[in-house]
Image: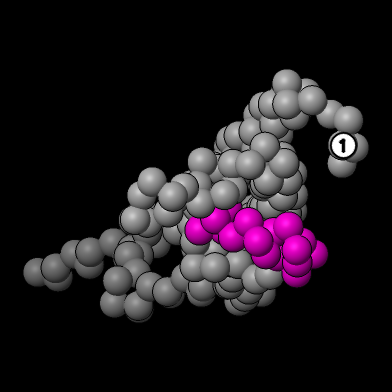
Amino acid sequence: MPESLSTDQLLGLYKIAVEEYRFEVRLNWDRTAYYLTLNSGLIAIAVGLLKVGGDPRVNLVVASMFLIGCCASAIAIINIKKGHDYYRSAVVKKTLFEERLGLTKPSEDYASRPSMAIGTTIGQTEHLQILHNTQEWLNRPLRRSITFWIRGILVAFFLANAFGIAVSLWLYRHPPVAPQPSSASRLIPVEEREPPKKAIH
């Protein structure tokens, strides 16, 4: 970063970096809520249609809905990973400005020696690794965080939709056979019945 930047300029850029960080957090959460709602709705509708049964062609419609659910789950998993990458990049930029402004230095006034940098999550407190091993920090695997568990839920949605496709296609190819009425339960039409014989006196 150019040394000619004044403190006011650094503060202005730092404010922009913080706003970008907040934007990425909000955008990722909005996307996550949308994908979870969409996948839950698709599975609920498809299972409801699957219970209706009836015409085997309905099972093809159900299979297509499960297929849409599979695609939505896969897209959600990819987008959440990509959104988390953008979030990490925003954290790196924010930490860089915090370092230039001296906000990452531990305070000597407290026993725990906290810094004035934003450290809401564990990852944001790793400013040394962020600044000196940036690429390694960006590419590290997900911890067992909210994003980790949400991705697990979306993987479960994907597997449930794939199972729904298999069940729907199996029911389409093997429609249930309607039970045949037994001979005892068959009624003879009135017009086919023999008239009663007259008694001979």
Q: Position of residue 187 (x, y in %)?
A: 32, 65
Q: Residues within 10 Å of mark 1 (few under 14, many from 20)?
A: few
Q: Position of residue 81 (x, y in %)?
A: 69, 57
Helix, strand or loop at mark 1: loop
Residue 158 painted magenta: no
- The answer to which of 186 and 1 lies nearer the viewer is 1
What type of secondary structure mainly makes up the magenta span? helix
Count of numbered marks: 1
The answer to which image quadrant residue 23 occupies is top right
Residue found at x 68% / y 46%: 99
The answer to which image quadrant residue 51 occupies is bottom left
Residue found at x 38% / y 46%: 109
The residue range painted magenta reads 122-137
Locate the C terminus by quadrant: bottom left
Residue found at x 35% / y 78%: 183
Residue found at x 67% / y 64%: 129
Q: How was the colour assigned to the protein in this rendering? A: one colour
Image height check: is 80 above or below 182? above
> Is residue 174 shown to the viewer in this render?
yes
Q: Position of residue 154 (x, y in %)?
A: 57, 60
Question: Which residue is label 1 attached to?
Answer: 3
Image height check: is 183 above or below 47? below
Residue 134 painted magenta: yes
Q: Position of residue 166 (x, y in %)?
A: 63, 73
Side (left or right) of 5 relative to 180: right
Residue closest to the far front: 108
Q: Disc 1 residue type?
A: Glu
Image height check: is 180 above or below 74? below
